[in-house]
């Protein structure tokens, strides 16, 4: 349920991410396969695969599971061919929503996503209807490092921005700089817990509790779909409402 507003503490966000680790395993396996299919199984010449393998290590995925996913994606093992797709639409109160999926059955997934939007007060739109409201950015989560040190190391390595709260740090980079900035942080002794590329809203819409509840229900139902990898939105709420809704 990825957004990027001033909502609440990074520590709270990290707790939510940890609670979703089961689905993260499935998501990472699919990303490994897609990355290997698109760029081959050689990490040296495939930056996307390097990032995917690092994400797999972040969730403690066994080495043989990683290798099997890469081989399957590269066509070295039999398996269903996966396709990446993005759906765009609006939730209750006009909130912009983007849904990234990886599927082996486009018709099934499209029908499921459309049904969920309709049932929970949203509207599935055409390609591009809300995409311009988001931008792809690299996100690195770190913890326990001194705030000034994290800021200095990250910016020197090419990061765009650093936000810190209660010992947790979120570093924003361009999509191509994720791995380089991560390696610089780790070389400086800063503990990195996760890294990857996500979509961040360029503008947000602030909602009160009751409006936000309706949006959160739609977002949650979309996330329950096994084909869905990420759900992005531009809703902004207060820290109290965010904690109450778990977003």
Image (cartoon, rainbow, N blue to C red):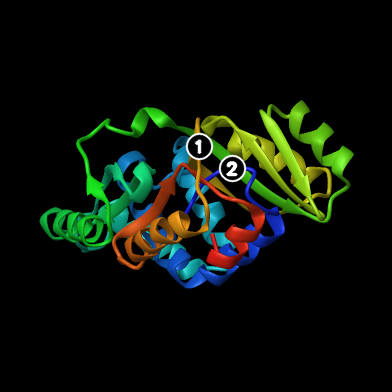
Front-most of 123 and 67?
123
Disc 1 and disc 2: Cα gap in Å? 7 Å
Please tell me which of labels 1 and 2 falls first in the chain. 2
Which residue position holds label 1? 204
Q: Is residue 59 visible?
A: no
Asked whether 84 or 221 is in front, the reply is 221
- Disc 1 + disc 2, Cβ < 8 Å: yes
The residue under the point 64% across, 66% down is: 15
Q: Nearer the viewer, residue 161 or 28?
A: 161
Circle 2 Cα neighbour tier, 10 Å, few/some/many (<14 / 14–19 / ≥20): some
Closest to the observer, 184 or 66: 184
Label 2, on which residue?
Answer: 5
Q: Position of residue 83 (x, y in %)?
A: 23, 49
Q: Position of residue 102 (x, y in %)?
A: 29, 54
Q: Residues within 10 Å of mark 1 (few under 14, many from 20)?
A: many
Where residue 89 appears, as percent x and y from the top left, is 28, 43
150 w.r.t. 242: above or below:
above
Task: Examine the rendered structure and indicate whether residue 201 appears above or below residue 123.
Answer: above
């Amino acid at each position: 349920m990825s957004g990027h507003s001033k909502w609440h503490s990074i520590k709270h966000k990290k707790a939510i991410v940890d609670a979703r680790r089961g689905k993260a395993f499935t998501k990472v396996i699919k990303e490994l396969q897609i990355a290997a299919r698109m760029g081959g199984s050689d990490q040296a010449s495939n930056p996307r695969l390097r990032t995917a393998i690092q994400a797999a290590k972040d969730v403690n995925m066994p080495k043989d599971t990683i290798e099997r996913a890469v081989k399957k994606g590269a066509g070295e093992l039999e398996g269903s061919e996966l396709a990446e797709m993005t759906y765009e639409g609006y939730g209750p109160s006009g909130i912009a929503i983007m849904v990234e999926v990886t599927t082996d059955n486009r018709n099934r997934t499209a029908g499921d996503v459309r049904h969920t939007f309709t049932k929970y007060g949203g509207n599935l739109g055409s390609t591009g209807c809300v995409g311009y409201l988001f931008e792809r950015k690299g996100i690195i989560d770190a913890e326990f490092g001194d705030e000034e040190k994290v800021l200095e190391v990250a910016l020197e390595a090419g990061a765009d921005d650093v936000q810190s709260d209660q010992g947790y740090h979120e570093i924003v980079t361009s999509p191509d700089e994720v791995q380089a900035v991560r390696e610089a942080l780790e070389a400086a002794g800063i503990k990195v817990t996760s890294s990857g590329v996500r979509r961040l809203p360029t503008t947000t819409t602030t909602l009160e509790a009751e409006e936000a509840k309706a949006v959160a229900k739609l977002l949650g139902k979309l996330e329950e779909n096994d084909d869905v990898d990420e759900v992005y939105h531009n809703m902004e709420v207060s820290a109290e409402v965010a904690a109450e809704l778990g977003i």
